[in-house]
Every structure is written in structure tokens, then in C-alpha cells.
Amino acid sequence: ISDSGTILGNTGIHAASLGAGPQTVQVLVTGGTGITGSAGNGIEASTAGTGLVTVGVNCTPISSPVSGATNGIAASGNGAINVFTADNITGSSGRGISAVSSGTGGNVAVNVGGTPTTAVSGTTGGILASTTNANSVNVSVSGINLVTATTSGRAIDAESGSGNVTVNSSATTIHGVSRGIYALTTGAIDIGG
């Protein structure tokens, strides 16, 4: 989607594959003045199968403000999940970014960039990146002002069953209610700045 205006709906953007196989779901947004889910998520991307779910890509992150009545961005499936953003992401009654791989799982990566005024915020959490089994989780936050959970929960929550968990952040402020950064796995954990 290349947009110079505003995207507004109960859910801002909904992209879902209901197939049980390795179908890929990809959402790309360049430009625009905002994506808003007035009754649900700002962007939701999911698959019932094991294919890759990606919201933005490394060279073309989501470059428009995203807000949702629930989560800002919700990405889910049973395989690998990638989320790349470069603007404000807000979840009014949930998380700013939720990236969750279930079932046999897959690697989960959340890469947040932007400007010194950019923020990722949610009432119950800033960023959730979670997977199962020996799959890895990587959360990278660079060049932005704030990652926050405003009412409850954790600013950054990174969890795996037994895979490596890596959190790197150079955000000016990481502010959670219960915890700023929470990393959980039976494997290796690496937290840096």
C-alpha cells in the first residue's frame, strides 16, 4: 500500500490467510498520514498456517503512524513473524506492537526505528514478541524517544520456549508498569543498548 492520505476503519488494515499451509502474509505501507483502527487493531496480519507473517520489511518499514483501539499492530501465526516500523505506534487498550508465534512456532523479529520524537506505546504493554520451542526472538529499538506501557504490563516483553532471546534498545526511555524489559526463555538471553 502506497498511501498519501489516511486509512480508517474498525480495523485499519486486516490481512489474513486462513489456509493451513505455508502461505505468506505481507503488509507494506509507505507514506500516508495515519492508519487507525477505531474499534480494533490498527494493522492486523495473521495466518492459520506456518507461513511468514511480515508487517513492513527491513528496507521498507511501516512509515505511517498506526493506532488501534486495541493494539497498534498485531501479527500472529504459527511460523516466523517480522515487524518493522519507523513511526509512532499506539495501542489504546492493548499493546503498541504484538508479534506472537504459536504452535510449533517460528523466529520472531521486531525492529523499531524512527526519529527522536517517535514512540511505541500501549496500555497493557509497549512491545510483545513471543514464540515457542527453540525459536528465537529478537527485538531491536533504535533512534526513538519512548517505549512504554502506560497502565499495566511491560514496556518490552520478549519470550521464547527455549530459543535465544535478544533485546537491543537505544530508546531514550523504556517505561513499563511491572517491568521495563522482560526476557524469558530456557535458552540464552542477551540484553544490550
Image (cartoon, grey):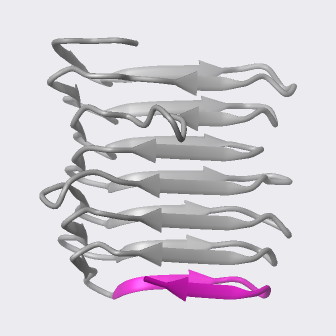
User: Is residue 146 placed above or below 45 in the rendered structure?
Assistant: below
User: Percent x, y for residue 168?
Assistant: 49, 75
Magenta: main secondary structure: strand
Q: In front: 146, or 121?
A: 146
Which region shows up in magenta?
A: 179-193
Q: Quadrant of residue 190?
A: bottom right
Q: Is residue 15 left or right of residue 145?
A: right
Give the quarter of the figure containing the C terminus: bottom left
* Above-or-below relation of 72 to 189: above
Question: Residue at image x 54%, y 36%?
Answer: 57
In the rendered image, residue 67 lying in the magenta stretch gets the answer no
Q: Nearer the viewer, residue 103 or 98?
A: 98
* Residue 70 as seen in the image, left or right of residue 34: right
Q: Residue at x 25, y 31 (%)?
A: 64
Residue 69 image-quadrant placement:
top left
Q: Quadrant of residue 104?
A: bottom right
The one nearer the camera, 158 or 59, is 59
Query: In the image, residue 179 lies at what x, y percent?
Result: 36, 87
Up-down relation of residue 152 to residue 120 (above or below): below
On the image, the x and y values in percent for residue 174 come to 27, 79
Q: Residue at x 70, y 72 (%)?
A: 160
- Give the number of callouts: 0
Q: Which percent across, then down, holds residue 2?
A: 35, 12
